[in-house]
Image (cartoon, grey):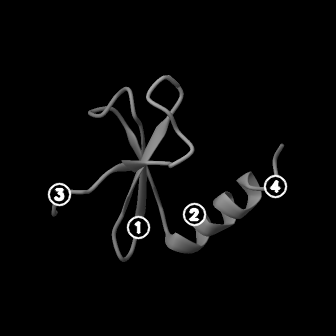
Amino acid sequence: MTELTWFKSSHSSNEDAQCVEVAKTPDTIHVRDSKDKTGPQLTFEPPAWRAFVDFAATID
């Protein structure tokens, strides 16, 4: 497995303790807690991740 390149949302700040990081590959989207970089990760197929992001954008 190649090294993943992780990034936080541009909406995240360094002061907010509740951030997730995301890493993309052609076939998967990986998600982890930014405070626990060696902890568990979630993995999604791109259509499932897109559905989640679209839904999350509708929440106030």
**Residue under pointer 3:** 3
Position above or below: 22 against 34: below
Count of number-bearing discs: 4
Mark 2 is on which residue type? Trp
Q: Position of residue 38 (x, y in %)?
A: 26, 33
**Residue 19 - label:** none
- Vertical order, 20 against 54 (above or below): above
Disc 3/disc 1 C-alpha distance (Å): 13 Å
Q: CA distance from mark 2 to mark 4?
A: 15 Å
Q: Residues within 10 Å of mark 1 (few under 14, many from 20)?
A: some
Disc 1 residue type (three-letter): Thr
Question: Which residue is tagged 2?
Answer: 49
User: What's the amino acid at mark 3?
Assistant: Glu
Mark 3 or mark 4: name the one nearer the start of the chain.
Answer: 3
Q: Amino acid at mark 4?
A: Thr
Residue that badge 4 annotates:
58
Q: Nearer the viewer, mark 4 or mark 1?
A: 4
Q: Are marks 4 and 1 in contact (CB under 8 Å)?
A: no
Q: Could you say whether the residue bearing mark 4 is in a helix, strand or loop?
A: loop
Residue farthest left in this picture: 2
Q: Which quarter of the figure is the C terminus placed in?
A: top right
Residue indicated by mark 1: 28
Give the residue displayed 37% in from the left and 37% down from the top.
Answer: 40
The residue located at (33%, 32%) in the rendering is: 39
> Viewed as shown, does residue 32 lie left or right of 10?
left
* Image quarter in which the N terminus is found: bottom left
Q: Earlier in the sequence, mark 3 or mark 1?
A: 3
CA–CA distance between discs 4 and 1? 23 Å
Q: Earlier in the sequence, mark 2 or mark 4?
A: 2
Crowding at label 2, few (<14), some or many (≥20) Cα neighbours within 10 Å? some
Label 3 vs 2, first from the N-terminus = 3
Question: Residue 53, percent across and down?
Answer: 65, 59
